[in-house]
Image: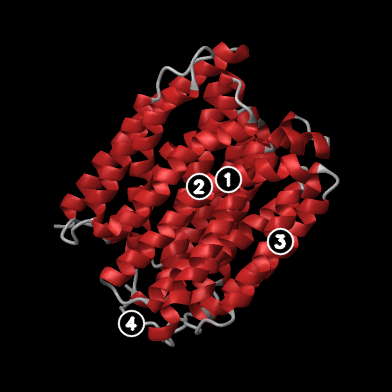
Amino acid sequence: MTTLAPPRAARRAPGTSAALAVPAAATLLALMNYTAPMATLADTARGLHAGGTAQIWLMSSISLGLAAALLAVGSLADDHGRRRVFVLGAAVLAVSSVVCALATNAPLFVGARIVQGAASAVLIATGLGIIAASFEPGPRRAHATGVWGAMIGLGIALGPIASAGLAEIGGWRLWYWVCAAASVPVGLAALRLPESRAARPRGLDLPGLLTMVLGIGALVAAITMGRLGWTRPSVLGLFAAAAVLLAAFTAVEARRREPMLDLGLFRRPAFQLSIVGALITGLAVIGIMSYLATLMTLVLGLSALASALVLAIWSGISFAAALQARRLPSRLPAGRLLGAGLALSAAGELAMLGMGPDGHWWRLAPGLVVSGIGSGLANAMLARLAVESVPADRASMGSGANNTARYVGASVGVAVVGAMTTGQGGGASGLAHGTNVAMLVSAAVALGGAALMMVIRERDR
């Protein structure tokens, strides 16, 4: 088991404001970029001459890069310097965004989005690590991780709105130029932060790195391609490859003296809460909400911008709730609050049942508000658990593991929701029925997750 050690070169005092502002801004940009295609998928597909299969990858390719890179870059940042890796991530995001803006065909765009996902993984994992190194455990760190978690909700809110608005001004490519331009000041601002790294670097775990990245990549690719048919040989082959590679990763990590991921962490209830809670959040909340704007357009007949604005009720409330989570009594365990957040998310999803082609968008508003409160609370608690459930000098690794689980869960959730909504027959009525089924299933999973959070918490006593 890894011993606790204070992070090195974690100068606090005057730099702490920037140490929060820069990672928060980077996470906001990463999540805006993650959700941007939700509002412009049709225009993007037309511009790239993308067919049905390619459109799945236009939406899902960034998840492949995110999920595959998060844990790896978190561990590398702990060893080689969080600021250094963060700046590199901002530079890669800028370059890959330019490639997206200039892409003339779907394969080039998809490849650039995968690289964008890896760059976003760098910003997310190392950003939370920088915050953990800059704020001592206690109320100030709780506030800082709450702000960071709030950026997830705000980014999801602003991404579709920004991309839809910019598309009306100058086409769907304009968002990617804006993303490239915004990445530059984020990277430059990070250069002024103090460097921080683990007190005792572990060295490069190349076998673990390769098996984990390839295994997660194969798993997410299989989930994405499964939407075209789960029994296709290519899908089954990818699932088999993922199983072999992830089993190899586990075997490698179990035998290494200095593993990239200490498997003993899974015996800690707090780490279990961090990983399982993130997985369920991705599966039961992000999955359905990622599709909701598109479904409002197809079922309710709203414009892309109007659908994004309605979805912003959920994500905007999520942002506000995460910011206010620091005001909750410190005696309340993070695991119980995470369970409450998942339960509220489920209640909101149940309140949105009954969506149909003759309905109105305001019928969804109460459920979006309740679910937004739950999502904000869950995001704040997941950010706190991500850094507090691991040794002090492995905060970026903890963030990477937590967010890997979140985006693997989101990939599964998107695939399941897509299968449910498109498998109910054609037309708005079929889509509406599929949406209600997906909403009900998502609520059931979220409720099950809430109960599980309470069970794990009981074991922590």
Q: Residue at x 58, y 32 (%)?
A: 306
Local crowd size for mark 4, using a 10 Å CA cut-off: few (<14), some (14–19), many (≥20): few
Horizontally, residue 170 falls left or right of residue 455, namely right
Which residue is the site of mark 2?
A: 408
Q: CA distance from mark 4 to mark 1?
A: 34 Å
The disc, 4 or 1, on the residue closer to the chain's N-terminal end is 4
Which residue is the site of mark 4?
A: 5
Q: Looking at numbered disc 2 in the image, what kind of residue is underneath it?
A: Val
Q: CA distance from mark 4 to mark 3?
A: 37 Å
Which residue is the site of mark 1?
A: 220
Q: Looking at numbered disc 3 in the image, what kind of residue is underneath it?
A: Ala
Local crowd size for mark 2, using a 10 Å CA cut-off: few (<14), some (14–19), many (≥20): many
The disc, 4 or 2, on the residue closer to the chain's N-terminal end is 4
Per the rendering, the mark at residue 180 is 3
Q: Residue at x 56, y 60 (%)?
A: 121
264 or 374: which is nearer to us? 374
Up-down relation of residue 311 to residue 30 (above or below):
above
Q: CA distance from mark 3 to mark 1?
A: 26 Å
Task: Tell me whether the residue at label 4 lies in contact with that at label 3, contact meaning CB atoms closer than 8 angstroms.
Answer: no
Task: Tell me whether the residue at label 4 lies in contact with that at label 1, contact meaning CB atoms closer than 8 angstroms.
Answer: no
The disc, 1 or 2, on the residue closer to the chain's N-terminal end is 1
- The furthest residue to the front: 169
Q: Residue 274: x, y in percent? A: 35, 55
